[in-house]
Amino acid sequence: MKAHNPHELLARLNEIAAGLPFEVTTRPMMGGFIGYADGKVFVSISSGGLGVKLLPADQERALARPGATRMRHSADQPYSKTYITLSDKDIADDDVLTEWLLLAAKTAPAPKPRKKS
């Protein structure tokens, strides 16, 4: 498993975010970042790479791309059931990265309501 620099991947997400039709925000999370599209979780960034949150049918299409894998935040962690890590080549390609970010944002579930105390 190749180790990625989460800060470099965050910078790449922020670079692309300006051209997306929704607001992208991020929060630090366990050594990486979680990305939100208009408040909905749509990407995970860690030393495991940049993972887009996809529905099962879209996951299969993403996994067919060279270099794409199920996300693992570290070598001792299980594979994700919902996040697909894109290849370095796809992350570097503005059009390809934008396509997957748009899809992830479109299919991201709305946040669950918080329980009142």
Image (tube, grey):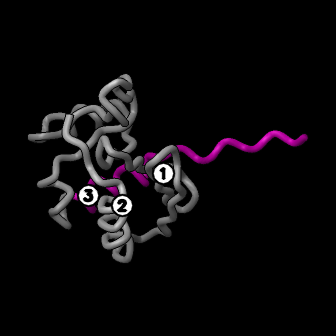
Count the marks: 3
Badge 1 density bin: few <14, some 14–19, many ≥20, Cα 10 Å? some
Residue 34 % position (x, y): 48, 51
- Name the amino acid type tagged 2: His
Vertical placement of 34 versus 116: above or below? Answer: below
Q: Rounded to the nearest whole Å, what is the CA distance between mark 2 and mark 3? A: 22 Å
* Quadrant of image for the C terminus: top right
Q: Earlier in the sequence, mark 3 or mark 1?
A: 1
Say which of 108 and 12 sits in front.
Answer: 12
Q: Rounded to the nearest whole Å, what is the CA distance between mark 1 and mark 2? A: 12 Å
Residue at horizontal 22 percent and vertical 40 percent from the top? 62
The question of residue 98 being in magenta is answered with: yes
Badge 3 density bin: few <14, some 14–19, many ≥20, Cα 10 Å? few
Residue 10 % position (x, y): 37, 62
Residue 87 % position (x, y): 17, 47
Residue at horizontal 62 percent and vertical 46 percent from the top? 111
Vertical placement of 102 versus 108: above or below? Answer: below
- Where is mark 2, residue-wise? 7
Badge 2 density bin: few <14, some 14–19, many ≥20, Cα 10 Å? some
- Name the amino acid type tagged 1: Ile
- Where is mark 3, residue-wise? 99
Residue 2 % position (x, y): 19, 40
* Quadrant of image for the N terminus: top left
- Which residues make up the magenta segment? 97-117
> Which one is closest to the eye, mark 2 or mark 3?
2
Vertical placement of 65 versus 19: above or below? Answer: above
Residue at horizontal 73 percent and vertical 44 percent from the top? 113
- Where is mark 1, residue-wise? 34
- Name the amino acid type tagged 3: Glu
